Amino acid sequence: MPPAESSRARRLLRAGLAGYLVVVALVTLGPQPLDGATLGIVERSVAWLARLGLPVTYNGVEAAANVALFVPYGVLGGLLARRRRWWVVLVVASATSAAIETAQRALPTRYPTLQDWLLNTLGAALGLALLALVLRHRRRSAA
C-alpha cells in the first residue's frame, strides 16, 4: 500500500507532482535565466565561499543544483507509487530528464549534457532514499 492511502491525499500529491513538473519545465526549458547580474552574484558568492576555505566551484554549484532539482521528483513519485514500484519512479524520472536534455538541443540558450541527465537521475534516487529513511523512522517511532 502506498504511503498516501487516502483519496484526498493522493489527489493532493498528484497536484503537487504536476505543479512541480511545470516548475521544472519552466526552469529547464525557458530562456537561460542567468543574465550578467545574476551570474555575477553567483560567481561572487562562489568566490567568497572559496576564500573561506570551502571547496566550492561554479561547476560544483551547478551540479548540486541539478541533483537538488530532481529530489522532489523522487519524494513525490515515491509517495504516489507502491514501494515495490519505486524503480518505476526512478526510470520515469530519468526518462523525464532525458526528454528535457533532448528538448534543450533545439533551444538556442540551452546546453544539454549527459552529466545533467545523470545528476537529475541521481537527484530522483536521493529523493527516494530520503523518503525511505523518513518512512522507516516513522515506522520505528510508531512501534
Image: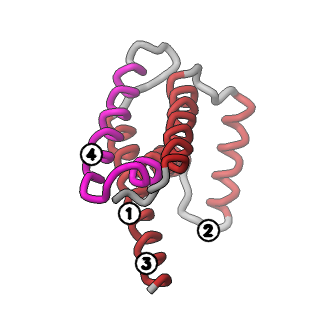
> Which residue is painted at 62% across and 60% down in the image?
50
The N terminus: image quadrant: bottom left
**Badge 3 amino acid:** Arg
Depth-wise, is mark 4 or mark 2 nearer the camera?
A: 4
Which residue ends up furthest to the bottom in the rendered image?
Answer: 143
Between the C-alphas of marks 1 and 3, the distance is 15 Å
Residue 32 in the image, given as x and y percentages of width and height: 58, 24
Is 81 above or below relative to 142?
above
- Mark 4 burial class by Cα count in 10 Å: few <14, some 14-19, many 20+: some
Q: What count of labels does the image hold?
A: 4
Is 136 above or below relative to 17?
below
- The residue labelled by disc 2 is 53
- The residue labelled by disc 3 is 139
**Mark positioned earlier in the residue sequence (3 or 2):** 2
What SS does tag 3 mark?
A: helix
- Mark 3 burial class by Cα count in 10 Å: few <14, some 14-19, many 20+: few
User: Residue 103: within the magenta?
Assistant: yes
**Badge 4 amino acid:** Val
**Mark positioned earlier in the residue sequence (1 or 2):** 2
Depth-wise, is mark 3 or mark 2 nearer the camera?
A: 3
**Mark positioned earlier in the residue sequence (1 or 3):** 1
Q: Are marks 1 and 3 in contact (CB under 8 Å)?
A: no
* Range of magenta residues: 75-104
Residue 123 in the image, given as x and y percentages of width and height: 41, 51
Q: Nearer the viewer, residue 61 or 5?
A: 5
